[in-house]
Amino acid sequence: MDETFYTVIKCSYGSVVGYRTSDWTYPSKGGELVMDVGTTVKDALDKICEAFDNTYEYFYDLDGKFIF
């Protein structure tokens, strides 16, 4: 007989669920994170995402809060 166990927890709004935060370090393979005058924040965020092989994403949630 295959038994399946579930864990249920109560989380409050704003809780970190499903992932763990950690210190972030820019990888050396991404080159320098230096931008030219007139470069947009979006361009900088795109460069960061590309340096991490697009494992990061950024967006606004339904409440209008910026998520990276």
Image (spheres, rainbow, N blue to C red):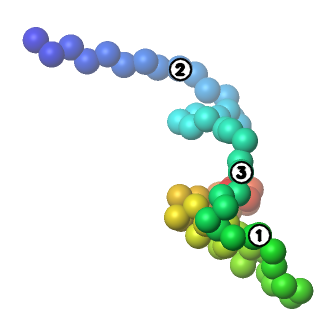
Is residue 58 toward the left or the right of residue 66 in the image?
Answer: left
Q: Quadrant of the N terminus?
A: top left
**Image location (x, y in percent) of residue 32:** 75, 70
Estimate how packed mark 3 is, as few (under 14), some (14 to 19) or many (20 or more) residues with alpha carbons within 10 Å: few
Q: Could you tell me if residue 18 is visible in this image? A: yes
Nearer the observer: mark 2 or 1; the answer is 1
Q: Amino acid at mark 2?
A: Ile
Closer to the camera, 53 or 56? Answer: 53
| Mark sitting earlier along the chain (1/3) | 3
Q: Which mark is residue 9?
A: 2
- At 67% from the left and 28% from the top, the residue drawn is 12
| 21 over 52 or under it: above or below | above
Is residue 37 toward the left or the right of residue 56 in the image?
Answer: right
For the residues bearing labels 2 and 1, Cβ distance under 8 angstroms: no
Q: Which mark is residue 33?
A: 1
Nearer the observer: mark 3 or 2; the answer is 3
